[in-house]
Amino acid sequence: MTEIIIREAVTADIPNLHRLIESAYRGEASRAGWTTEADLLGGQRTDPDDLAGILADPAQALLTAWRGDELVGCVLIADRGEGTGYFGMLSVSPTLQGGGMGRRLVEAAHGALAGRFGAHRVRISVFPQRETLIAWYRRLGYEATGETLPFPYDDPRLGLPLRDDLHFIVMERALA
Ligand SMILES: CC(C)(COP(=O)(O)OP(=O)(O)OC[C@H]1O[C@@H](n2cnc3c(N)ncnc32)[C@H](O)[C@@H]1OP(=O)(O)O)[C@@H](O)C(=O)NCCC(=O)NCCS
């Protein structure tokens, strides 16, 4: 198998990033993977303006995983202050999932959050309906904090909800 290279995204990566993230999170293409938001949300997960805003923000970055010149995975990292980091938008090409790339990207996110932002703990937010995904995050060391966050029903840039009870649970782990 061709080696996977992980590097930070640049502006020229935005079209590839947009395609990858939408294919992992939404619609029929995402169902080739083992976990998707397609049953919870329609519409978009992100858009090129949103991605450009992330790249322009010194408190955020996108790590990208490449197999040759093919973008096969990505993860957003963000500094939430006071030693707390966050990751999200974790995406692996649906047809390549289950081969360890997701775990590798999470480990890269942990390293970058600690190295760049001095994070000593990481928080993530997950839909409680996604039980297999939550089980995986538990295996990666995350535990639910008991906190919940509202889903922004008034912001179609994050998707078009297919149910009226969407919210997130917060999970957290310490970094060594
Ligand atoms: C979440 C995601 C990034 C994981 O990527 P991945 O490359 O499949 O991750 P890995 O191969 O490293 O790990 C997959 C894990 O799921 C498990 N798994 C595989 N198929 C599964 C299935 N059908 N049901 C449950 N678990 C499954 C594997 O055993 C593995 O667990 P392990 O690491 O404890 O052995 C990927 O599924 C994805 O892009 N999903 C769509 C976007 C998304 O939901 N992102 C997270 C939002 S918070």
Image (cartoon, grey):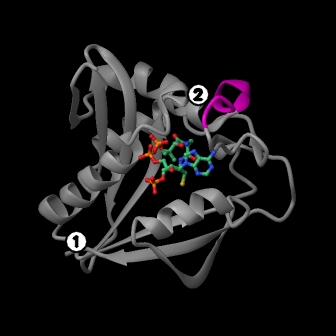
x, y percent for residue 27? 72, 30
What's the mark number on residue 136? none
| Residue under the point 57% across and 34% down | 24
Q: Which amino acid does label 2 sit on?
A: Ser
- Whether the residues at callouts 1 and 2 have beta carbons within 8 Å, the answer is no
Rendered-image quadrant of the N terminus: top left
Question: Looking at the image, is mark 1 or mark 2 earlier in the sequence?
Answer: 2
The image's mark for residue 119 is 1
Q: Name the residue under label 2.
A: 23
Residue 29 painted magenta: yes
> Of residues 93 and 82, which is closer to you in this image?
93
Nearest the viewer among 69 and 152 is 69
Residue 124 seen anywhere in this rendered image of the structure: no
User: What is the residue that sits farthest to the top in this orientation?
Assistant: 69
Helix, strand or loop at mark 1: loop
Please give the name of the residue rendered at 49% of the width and 39% of the height, measured from the top-left corner: 98
